[in-house]
Amino acid sequence: METKIGDGIVRTICSYCSVGCALDIQIVDGKATKVLPAKDYPVNLGRTCTKGFNLLKAYDSPDRQLYPELRQSDGSYQRIDWDSAATIFSTKFKQIQERHGKDSVAFISTGQVPFEEMAVLGVLAKFGMGIKHGDGNTRQCMASAVVAYKQSFGFDAPPFSYQDAEESDLLIFVGANPVIAHPIFWQRVKMNQNNPSIVCIDPRLTETAKEAILHLAIKPKSDLSLLYALSKYLIDHDALDKQFILDHTQGFDEMAKHVQEFSIERAERDTGIAASEITKLAQLIQSKKKVSFWWTMGVNQGHQGVRTAQAMINIALMTGNIGRTGTGANSLTGQCNAMGSRLFSNTSSLISGHDFAVPEHRQKVADALSIPVESIPDNAGKSYDQILSAVDDGSIKGLWIICTNPAHSWIDKHAFFETMKKLDFLVVQDIYNSTETMMIADLRLAAAGSTEKEGTLINSERRLGIVQKVMQAPGEALSDFDIFHKLAKSWGCEQVLAKLQTPDQTFEVLASLSKGRPCDISGISSRALLVKNGGIQWPWPQGANPDGPGLGGQHRLLFADGKFFHPDGKAKFLTIEPEPAGELPDNDYPFWLLTGRGTMHQWHTQTRTSKVELIKKMYPSEAYVEINPLDAQRLNLVDKGKVKVETRRGSILVDVAIKDSVQAGHIFLPMHYAQTNYLTYSSFDSFSRQPSYKIGAARLIATDGSIGG
Ligand code: SF4
């Protein structure tokens, strides 16, 4: 579908981050020539960041994968046609399944493609090919938020709209740096007319912390202790919405008992923050009418990420800061379609937010797809890390990686590469031939980019928006949708996709399957409606009146009626005892190693942003480590000099960047450089299985060989 907004303009959604800005693409003589930020789209209101503005250029690159290729015994790649590629895919994976059992093949997908493609993959792989174990790279960024919401609210339901950032009078950012990570969302914060108080909880003096009236530069991973101390203060000072607690929650007494151990003095010891500063924040929460919490990877990528997110949810619930404008415990998503992946990818939950373990849900999905219910597994299968462990122990022999680059992004890369060597066959589907993961593929499948195909994305505020084809894919590259259909045919299971022949048809099936679920979008009769309405936030059930109370307009939040998604309608308070991270600084490795986003201009593993010359000028081309001036002076390190950063996993040589934004005793490595994950420490949140990228112990070795401690 190609819907034109005015003459020569096609509107599409930016496919980098989860803010979900709309871009108006100017088409002249059949060619996409220019990107203009959409002025009338309720997300970006005429703004875009450098990544979105240069989106077209990312796809115009000499390293595009133009056709399928098969690795030869000498390591070179030979061009093959699509029929041969599909036959090789099916033959190899079927052989592995015959030799080692059905579960010896797995897939890892993405939060970067439209959810119609995710759903087709999930249906094809799990119900058609019998590949039970499949997960996505959203495990690396959003899994802890997902589990936190599911356990606390009864469904993975971020409650907010961006407009809440404009209406809040206290915004507390925890492990989040939206100034560079969600730059257009940050513009919405700046539009707030209430002179809001902005608080930032982060070990570093980030770009967001610099905008805050209060920055709590806590010791790494001491956030749980801090949040519990705030809870205790609010309980002790009777700063509660008791009626809300009584009517709409369960587990308050257990939570209140748990946090009694967390005095402000204990939090001062645990976090390194003065008691007076912690008290100041508690008093701010107590005094403000519209308090909102916002978190991202600093929380999700922690070893207790789920319970840390829930510690914020607890405060929002106990103070009645939920279901009202300007409030909420709000997780900002990472990738452009992380939420589409959460609801429709058929990985951690059954398609359309259903549960693999519930027989009625399996039957409903089977009926909608006209497939036998027996083909639907009764559990979600292994998580990302468990799939890799199974490769490592030899029980998974074939792996299919779609639109993600784990050879760059997975935690502890040395171990990752060792694991990959144990595979019998690795298929990688991507748009470039140069990603670290494509470089080790046995079979390469050439995919189209987001501006070369059709589909739907869901942004952080639950808004569905569509991507539209504005240019042709180069060479023989195909949309992921078409690749999946080709593979289905060659496998001999195309029947399983009979109801999912086009993105539009797939959308309609998914929408009908969502009926009655919290993420009900059955009222969106066609994707064309998404263009007309400036995107639509879920839920949008059948009969929804765009002008009606609670549904219409641009500001929609969940839980205004105090009803949550657990069977009793109540939200749950959940707690845990804080535990130290698995690896802490010691005499041998005395620095805290922190990782995170480097600049607004870099996207994740830089597979796209590194293709745009203009963007490349805006960030350091070489990997660097940020070091506090005191440590640099003590170790005789000079700015832009070289230093070796070493952990128990390995060592890398990088540039020195002396910055007082990192505390003495801490060092910070941006995640965008291929070297970083050679050093990261592999540990996982036990509830969400999300990797804990944020912590590790390191030492610095000067180029003269002296070790820094
Ligand atoms: Fe794209 Fe995110 Fe930038 Fe908006 S803020 S233009 S969605 S990268």
Image (spheres, helix red, strand yellow):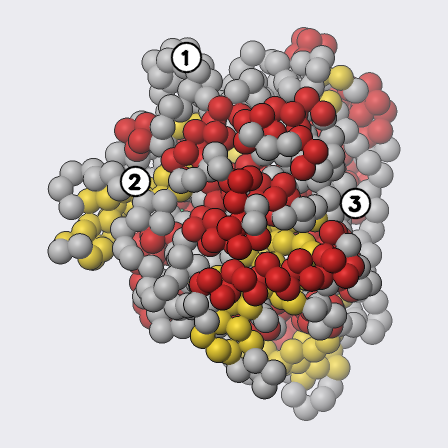
The amino acid pointed to by label 3 is Ser
**Secondary structure at numbered mark 2:** loop
Up the image or down, 552 lies above or below 386; here it is above
* Residue that extends furthest to the bottom in the rendered view of this protein: 704
Instruction: Name the residue beneath numbered marker 2.
Output: 1
**CB contact under 8 Å: marks 2 and 3:** no
* Viewer-closest of 652 and 605: 605
Let me know if residue 622 appears in the view. yes
Q: CA distance from mark 2 to mark 3?
A: 43 Å
* Viewer-closest of 102 and 707: 102
Of badges 1 and 3, the one in the foreground is 1
Mark closest to the chain's N terminus, 1 or 3:
1
The amino acid pointed to by label 2 is Met
- Residue 325: where, in percent of width, then height? 48, 21
Q: Residue at x 64, y 44 (%)?
A: 126
**Secondary structure at numbered mark 3:** loop
Q: Quadrant of residue 242?
A: top right
Q: Quadrant of residue 2?
A: top left
- Residue 592: where, in percent of width, then height? 72, 63
Instruction: Name the residue beneath numbered marker 3.
Output: 686
Instruction: Name the residue beneath numbered marker 1.
Output: 543
Q: Residue at x 73, y 44 (%)?
A: 381
Let me know if residue 308 appears in the view. no
Up the image or down, 159 lies above or below 62; here it is above
Q: CA distance from mark 1 to mark 2?
A: 25 Å
Q: Residue at x 66, y 30 (%)?
A: 373
Q: Residue at x 46, y 62 (%)?
A: 83
Mark closest to the chain's N terminus, 2 or 3:
2
Task: Name the image quarter holding the N terminus.
Answer: top left
**Secondary structure at numbered mark 1:** loop
